[in-house]
Amino acid sequence: MSTAIINEKVSKDISERLSESINKDKKFIGIIPSIEPKEISIIIPVKNNQTGIDSFLDLFFKTQKKETFPLEIIIVDNNSSEPVIISQDFTNRGIDIRLLTCRKRGAAAARNLGIRNSIGQWLLFCDSDCIPTVSLIVGYLQNNTKAIAYTGNIRSLTNTWLDDFYNSERVLLPRMKSNTKLELVPLYIITANALVWKDAIIKSGYFNESFSSAGGEDVELSIRLWEIGNIAAASGSEVLHDFGNGVKAFCKRFIHYGKGNRQLQSIAEIDMKPSFQKPKRSTCFHYFLKFLQHAFISIGYYTKKEK
């Protein structure tokens, strides 16, 4: 899990907050390098998801061509109860795959450890519950907008009734806003599939490690990234996201997002108080799920912060 749910009211708040940053001249931090495969470091935080790492690496080598292999893949184990391992099946395949251990809780801290140990000029963030497609890397190579960060496309791995809701509600896709050229740009990146220039993320101050659970940390980072450069959409790059099985995963996900929203509100001074919004698809079933989504976001939002 990688972001916070941004309802229409909050989207307006963030739009107003970022509008000036989106359209103003940015602080110069150097010449943005071209995106080349051998300058990309993939960073994947993981906790208790050995199956997800195995699936990611298996499908990576099945879908990616050698000429577009990245420089390295960095997997950061964030306090798994059973330590993650890298199977011998994935070694000596033309890519340096490294496994790091992060003792500080949270995907933000795990990603920062990966950043500090990375070699590439570009950092491709993915989640352990994502599956790469053939377009994962080549979708970013097609961009020439000279942005400092790009957010890719994320689609559900399966086609269950819950996945239909996730896709129609664009749960893992960012809100968009027009810039001065009337181009639609994403307000923030979503780290299930995002490419960021390493110098920019260092200059902006890395991920905020006070986010101890998944949710909100990528939105908060994006606010700081917009101060120094532009964020662009790279819809040509796609990953498939495993949202988990059944209602239990549904509830857990939105409780996490509610907690992330509350923390984002505290840090960025943006009103993240839950407010019910109509579903994108006006069916009785989607209304029911939307009520559930709102209820569990509210539970997370109003839950006291863990010590």
Image: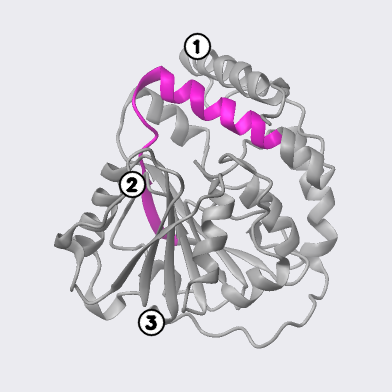
Q: What residue type is labelled 2?
A: Pro
Residue placed under numbered mark 3 in the picture: 38
Work out which quarter of the rendered image holds the C terminus and state it.
top right
From this view, report whether residue 72 is shown above or below residue 74: below
Residue placed under numbered mark 1 in the picture: 284
Rendered location of residue 136, percent (x, y): 36, 62
Residue placed under numbered mark 2 in the picture: 83
Q: Does the magenta stretch include residue 131?
A: no
Q: Which range of residues does the magenta coloring cover?
A: 236-261
Tell me the SS state at disc 3. Answer: helix
Q: Do the residues labelled 2 and 1 touch (CB within 8 Å)?
A: no
Dominant secondary-structure state across the stretch colored magenta? helix
Color encoding of the figure: one colour
- The crowding category of the residue bearing disc 2, from other C-alpha atoms within 10 Å (few below 14, some 14 to 19, many at least 20), is few
Say whether residue 86 is visible.
yes
From this view, report whether residue 264 is shown above or below residue 148: above
Q: Residue at x 54, y 46 (%)?
A: 173
Q: Are marks 3 and 1 in contact (CB under 8 Å)?
A: no
